[in-house]
Amino acid sequence: MERKVAWNERSQEDLAAMEQLAEEYRWFISENKTERECTQAAIALAEAAGYKPLSRAIAEELPLQPGDKVWAQAKGKALILVHVGRAPMAQGLNILGAHIDSPRLDIKQNPLYEAQGLALLDTHYYGGIKNYQWVALPLALHGVVAKTDGTVVDVVIGEDAADPVFCVTDLLPHLGRAQLAKTGDKVVEGEDLDLLVGSFPAQAQAAEGEGEGAEGDKPEAPKDPVKARFLQLLEEKYGIGEEDFLSAELEVVPAGPARELGLDRSMIIGYGQDDRVCAFTSLKAQLALAASPVVPDTTAVCVLVDKEEIGSVGATGMTSRFFENTMAEIMELAGESGMLLLRRGLEASRMLSSDVSAGFDPAYASVFEAKNSAYLGRGLVFNKYTGARGKSGSNDASAEYVARVRRVMDDAGVFFQTAELGKVDAGGGGTIAYIPAEYGMDVIDSGVAVLSMHAPWEVTSKIDVYEAYRGYEAFLRHM
């Protein structure tokens, strides 16, 4: 049962719309490489589409009516958008849920040191990475530094063409015989992923309050002159001292914008497409409802969360109470107060866990089962289940729910395919799907096929991005 190649079925008008969406998408993932940046950008787009902060509605006790649109955020790293529909929310919601964190290197709290005339920053990798993929690449630094006076400094270094970049060094092959004899997970150890940030020593200076001193005296030299110069530059540009690393969230990501891939420009290569390709298309689908004068029958919800790559934990992950508490506040303002109505509404809801799937790669065909794999160019991917081996850690969608989703996609003319995450015993993975399923709601994983998943640069097909957007919009309108 082979699915159609979407490229062959779309009109020139569709392909023009696809190109426009692809341009917007490339801009989004190039400009927003952290969960904080994604949240800020999504809020800006939502407010431009007429969304208002839920916090204001709560403070002013403003009732919510069908057609109203509100947003809520958690600590600047997770976001919920809600477009109130005509039907009571206790009858269920249509929900798109994606994550906006991606594998990366995080700067440690006490990171800066000097060794043999080089200044470096210690890192701790975040999420499932292959360490060796992060060496000898131009890298950028994104994040925030919170100071004890209450100010928060935004940091982005390495994205502007005039900016310097950073890197993790690699060992030359001439001396790498022992290194290359190691297994792949040991070729580059996690503690060796240190970021090279400088080599220019600070100039020696006379001690404060002293002149040049007696003839032959030399000015006092810093103990670690390269480290000292790096700190001088941070102080000059950002007002940051070494102690401020203690309360910083600085992420190391590949430098540079996403690009079109292939002579035919049919694909996109860029950082963080797991899972920002699904986050972006979910966001666009949610905002498309705001452009219509027709109020949706069912309340539409878009959830963009953090920490999926490390288990959906913490105050900004899907396991937090952020989603549940936000929906309780919204239902209260909509006149549907009480825990019982909230529980009924969540149980009656339908959700697409918008997350990427492993695209079939002919270079690594041995780990895929061809009949049940996702292919670039064949549209939106549905994973009835994920998990590892015996479906461990998976949400497994019911046959009835899969049939309903199929009908919605068919009626909307969306190209889609079904897949598993590789051969049964080859490995596996999970998403946020099992977490909202604990409320009793129907959930299925749905996303875009990706090549080189979790690598610094990942690959998607433009047509699949377009079909994901169309499929997500159809789900919100008609499920």
Image (tube, rainbow, N blue to C red):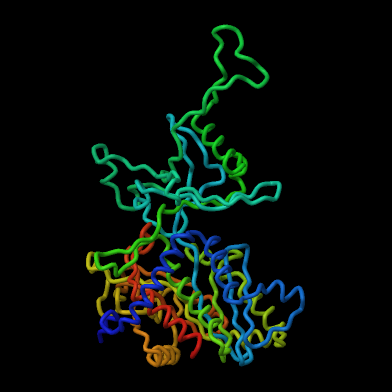
Percent x, y of residue 262: 26, 64
Residue situated furthest right in the rendering = 60
Percent x, y of residue 180: 26, 46
Residue 173 lies in quadrant: top left
Rendered residue at 76%/73% (across/down): 59
Residue 411 lies in quadrant: bottom left
Nearest the viewer among 380 and 177 is 380
Residue situated furthest top in the rendering = 215
Rendered residue at 54%/68% (across/down): 42
Rendered residue at 45%/50% (across/down): 160
Percent x, y of residue 122: 48, 43
Percent x, y of residue 434: 50, 76
Q: In the rendered view, does 386 fall on the left or right side of 208?
A: left
Nearest the viewer among 127 and 16 is 16
Residue 30 lies in quadrant: bottom left
Rendered residue at 23%/37% (across/down): 174
The quarter of the rendered structure image containing the N terminus is: bottom left
Q: Is residue 49 above or below residue 313?
A: below
Nearest the viewer among 370 and 34 is 34
